[in-house]
Image (cartoon, rainbow, N blue to C red):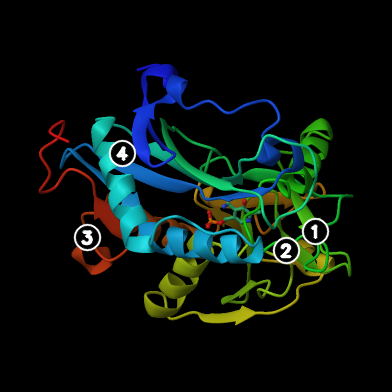
Amino acid sequence: MSINESIVFAKGAFRRYEDARVGLLTHGLNYGTGCFEGIRGYWNATERELYVLQLGEHYERLHRSARILLMKLPHTVDELCAITLELCARNRFEENIYIRPLLYKAAEDVGVRLGGVPDAFAIVAVPFAKYFDAEAGLKTGVSSWRRIDDTMAPARAKVTGAYINSALAKSEALMNGFDEAIMLSNDGHVSEGSAANLFLVREGTLFTPDPTQNVLEGITRSTVLTLARAKLGLTVVERALDRSELYTADELFLTGTAAGITFINSVDHRAIGSGAMGPVTRELTALFARVTSGSDPSYCGLSTPVYANRQVGAA
Ligand code: PMP
């Protein structure tokens, strides 16, 4: 199916993608005044079921982003979950997918501000294979671009315009021959990757920058923290991390909806641990795969089936 034929949810109704275009002067397009989410659906071929991961958590974060931007979502979390499942079913996906809800300032006029500008909301879903090669690992470099600060553009809100910060860092990393960037905050502490949270393992303890380090409060981050504590019995520490702690880590990995769990094999050309995937990362990856497959009852609260109890195509 081409993207133009796919079904999207826009301005309160299900429509074809090509019938839901926006104009050139759209406020969100010109000023980056919008917030969004990235949600994954994993196809379980054995069960012939599509499991959407942590739908409610993503829409709760979208509501929080909207509040920071003085915007208002036209639907509750429950309504958004139901619309998203319906959208997936209407597209009859039988593969891994990525779902992009977007709340944006929709006025087609000139003048940067937030108040008094109408909002519009849309959800698009597309087939999605993989973002990183989780088995190969990532060569990373500390970016010369610093992470946006809460006093400038809050990183905990998933704001469209703020992604220029990620794009500059990622592009610099690629131009320097790395796979991914690690960004420091303006005060020099480790923040996160261009679109993923960072974790560090040292002597069996799991560390990650706390939420005041200008990180997006990742949904995968929170799941990994829960799995590490509950299933692996690890001590977990959320605190400011120094750049030199990256160099001496036993293991480093990134987490994200697109990234999944991907280990880092080097930072600034320095090998991390043996340079291969470490044991803690491997265990967490295996646990996370049970979450994404949707079939393990102990994780059933984390994923929602699209097709169960639904007459596909009847909508
Ligand atoms: N940080 C940034 C800047 C991101 O864009 C993402 C991807 N949404 C993440 C972290 C990871 O967050 P999540 O696990 O919710 O996808």
Q: Give the mark nearer the N terminus: 4 vs 1.
A: 4
Which three-letter amino acid code belongs to the residue tagged 3? Asp
- How crowded pointer 4 is (Cα within 10 Å; few <14, some 14-19, many 20+) is rated as many
Taking the spot 43% from the left edge, 18% from the top edge, the residue there is 4
* Residue that label 3 marks: 296
Instruction: Identify the mark at residue 154; answer none if there is no mark.
Output: 2
Compared with residue 189, is residue 32 higher up or lower down, i.e. above or below?
above
Taking the spot 10% from the left edge, 38% from the top edge, the residue there is 311
Q: Give the mark nearer the N terminus: 1 vs 2.
A: 1
Which three-letter amino acid code belongs to the residue tagged 4? Leu
Determine whether the residue tagged by mark 3 lies in a helix, strand or loop: loop
Return the residue nearer the eye: 74 or 213.
Answer: 74
On the question of residue 117 being in view, the answer is yes
Disc 4/disc 1 C-alpha distance (Å): 33 Å
Q: Are marks 3 and 2 in contact (CB under 8 Å)?
A: no
* Residue that label 1 marks: 148
Return the residue nearer the eye: 68 or 6.
Answer: 68
* Residue that label 4 marks: 87
Q: Give the mark nearer the N terminus: 2 vs 4.
A: 4
Q: Give the mark nearer the N terminus: 1 vs 3.
A: 1
Number of the front mark, 4 or 3? 4
Taking the spot 26% from the left edge, 42% from the top edge, the residue there is 86
Which three-letter amino acid code belongs to the residue tagged 2? Pro
From the top left corner, tell me how far across and down residue 254 is, in percent. 60, 55
Number of the front mark, 1 or 2? 2
Q: Quadrant of the C terminus?
A: top left
Instruction: Identify the mark at residue 181; answer none if there is no mark.
Output: none
Left or right: residue 185 compared with residue 281: right
From the top left corner, tell me how far across and down residue 84 is, in percent. 33, 46
Left or right: residue 139 compared with residue 73: right
